[in-house]
Image: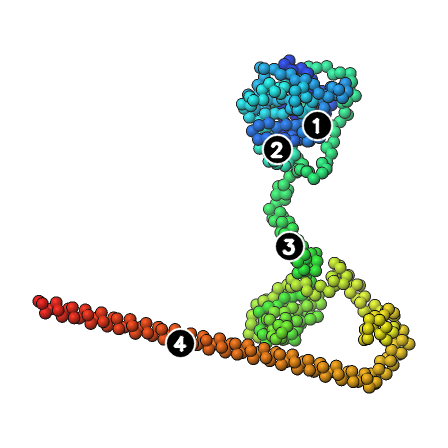
């Protein structure tokens, strides 16, 4: 009278106490025969206490006895069979997990340590583990959450009856399936790792795992840069035909770079980055080649080369600044037709040049495709307007106001510069005064120290003279 439980962490052989509790043992054996326990989870594993299973729903609130399948819903539960000779005194005791007195169904538990005597006479003990204590150790060491459910599912894969002393009821033949039921995938938010899950480190070598981790980290950083607006798209890649050049001499010009790098292939552009205010070189730039092979050849040949008394450093460019316009206009794509199509779009112009709405000088009107006749008419109108005295006076007035505004800006800038220069001069004068006072204090201290030393020296001489005179 024994049953073999094949779990996802090993096998367990359970010997049954059929003579002491026949109703419970018959329920357990017949449920195993109809494959009721197949794919059941160990839904509660309490370390050094018990491991509970037998609920097909995996929640701890389900399960039916074999008598419900045979006789109906009124026979879902059956009474306890408490035997005072059977105790929770060792590892591997198998007992029914009931919700109360006479509430036994399909759930059962296995003890994971000795001396659980406070469970005696509260639950029906119907068996004990004969083999598979190492499997119980693995179950006991499983990582679980606050509700004692393992993070990695532990399941009963199959049940095999080794010895069955009870005859099968006639109705049982219809309940026995032709094959074991298939495992259905879990649904919901509390989905755990399945029992056949294997860590990535065990499937691949360390180098491949490191490569995958770096790739995921790089993609994560790219998404963050896209969110903060540093790059146009997380999937954007820098061009492979652009070379980054740094440590340049400030006197090196764009034309010099273009001439030097032309030996490797056709250069589309050579740009040295400059300060937007002063126009001074920032000592680095970018060289764009027509072909990627030319860029690679320049990378291998030009690193640490002497140009204008400076040894330069070259690398492949990681800048995507030139791709911003494309992404702003056409989205995340690399479509040459979309970019080239800009030159093929029709030119549009206001059909009527006279302001109609929005006040004088403001032209808000519908836009139409301009024809040749419209072009000639509009050109003639603009010429007539430019010849009118009123138009010339308005132009002169705008020019004069523009000159006055530029002059005012220049005067304000000059005043600011003079104020800053006066402030710097005052700061320098204050610094000189502080230095002069500090030097004076130091000289006075030095003089005081010298006088004190002279006084001590003269006093010591007088003391020596007195001593010699006494002798």
Q: Is residue 196 above or below residue 286?
A: above
Farthest top residue? 19
Please give the name of the residue rendered at 79% of the width and 85% of the height, measured from the top-left corner. Answer: 392
| Label of residue 221 in the image | 3
How crowded is the residue under tag 4: few (<14 C-alpha within 10 Å), some, or many (20+)? few
Q: Are marks 1 and 2 in contact (CB under 8 Å)?
A: no
Residue 383: give x, y in percent of width and height.
85, 82
Give the alpha-carbon distance from disc 2 to disc 4, as whole Å.
79 Å
Residue under label 2, please give it: 148
How crowded is the residue under tag 2: few (<14 C-alpha within 10 Å), some, or many (20+)? some
SS state under label 1: loop
**Mark with earlier residue (2, 4):** 2
Give the alpha-carbon distance from disc 4 to disc 1, as whole Å.
94 Å
Give the alpha-carbon distance from disc 3 to disc 2, as whole Å.
36 Å
Please give the name of the residue rendered at 60% of the width and 73% of the height, measured from the top-left corner. Answer: 281
Q: Are marks 3 and 1 in contact (CB under 8 Å)?
A: no
Residue 468: give x, y in percent of width and height.
11, 68
Residue under label 1, please give it: 62
Give the alpha-carbon distance from disc 1 to disc 2, as whole Å.
17 Å
Residue under label 4, please give it: 436
């Amino acid at each position: 009278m024994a049953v073999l439980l094949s779990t996802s962490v090993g096998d367990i052989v359970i010997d049954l106490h059929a003579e002491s509790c026949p109703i419970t043992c018959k329920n357990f054996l017949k449920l195993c025969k109809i494959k009721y326990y197949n794919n059941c989870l160990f839904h509660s594993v309490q370390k050094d206490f018990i491991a509970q299973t037998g609920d097909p729903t995996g929640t701890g609130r389900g399960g039916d006895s074999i008598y419900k399948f045979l006789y109906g819903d009124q026979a879902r539960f059956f009474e306890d069979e408490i035997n005072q000779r059977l105790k929770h005194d060792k590892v591997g005791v198998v007992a029914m997990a009931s919700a109360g007195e006479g509430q036994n169904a399909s759930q059962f538990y296995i003890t994971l340590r000795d001396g659980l005597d406070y469970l005696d006479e509260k639950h029906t003990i119907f068996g004990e583990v004969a083999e598979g204590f190492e499997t119980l150790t693995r179950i006991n060491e499983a990582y679980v959450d606050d509700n004692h459910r393992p993070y990695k599912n532990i399941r009963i894969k199959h049940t095999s009856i080794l010895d069955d002393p009870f005859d099968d009821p006639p109705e049982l033949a219809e309940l026995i399936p032709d094959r074991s039921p298939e495992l259905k995938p879990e649904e919901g938010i509390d989905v755990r790792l399945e029992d056949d899950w294997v860590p990535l480190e065990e499937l691949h070598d360390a180098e491949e795992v490191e490569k995958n981790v770096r790739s995921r980290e790089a993609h994560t950083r790219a998404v963050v840069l896209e969110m903060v607006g540093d790059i146009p798209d997380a999937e954007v890649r820098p061009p492979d035909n652009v070379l980054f050049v740094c440590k340049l001499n400030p006197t090196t010009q764009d034309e010099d770079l273009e001439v030097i790098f032309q030996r490797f292939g056709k250069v589309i552009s050579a740009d040295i980055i400059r300060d937007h205010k002063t126009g001074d070189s920032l000592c680095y730039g970018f060289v764009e080649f027509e072909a990627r092979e030319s860029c690679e050849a320049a990378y291998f040949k030009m690193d640490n080369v002497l140009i204008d008394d400076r040894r330069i450093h070259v690398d492949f460019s990681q800048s995507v600044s030139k791709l911003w316009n494309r992404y702003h206009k056409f989205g995340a794509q690399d479509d040459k037709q979309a970019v080239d199509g800009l030159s093929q779009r029709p030119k549009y112009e206001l059909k009527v040049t006279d302001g109609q709405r929005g006040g004088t000088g403001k032209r808000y009107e519908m836009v139409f495709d301009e024809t040749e006749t419209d072009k000639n008419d509009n050109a003639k109108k603009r010429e007539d307007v430019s010849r009118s005295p009123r138009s010339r006076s308005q132009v002169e007035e705008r020019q004069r106001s523009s000159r006055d505004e530029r002059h005012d800006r220049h005067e304000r800038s000059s005043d600011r510069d003079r104020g800053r220069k006066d402030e710097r001069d005052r700061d320098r004068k204050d610094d000189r005064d502080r230095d002069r006072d500090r030097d004076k204090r130091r000289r006075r201290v030095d003089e005081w120290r010298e006088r004190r030393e002279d006084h001590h020296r003269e006093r010591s001489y007088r003391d020596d003279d007195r001593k010699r005179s006494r002798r």
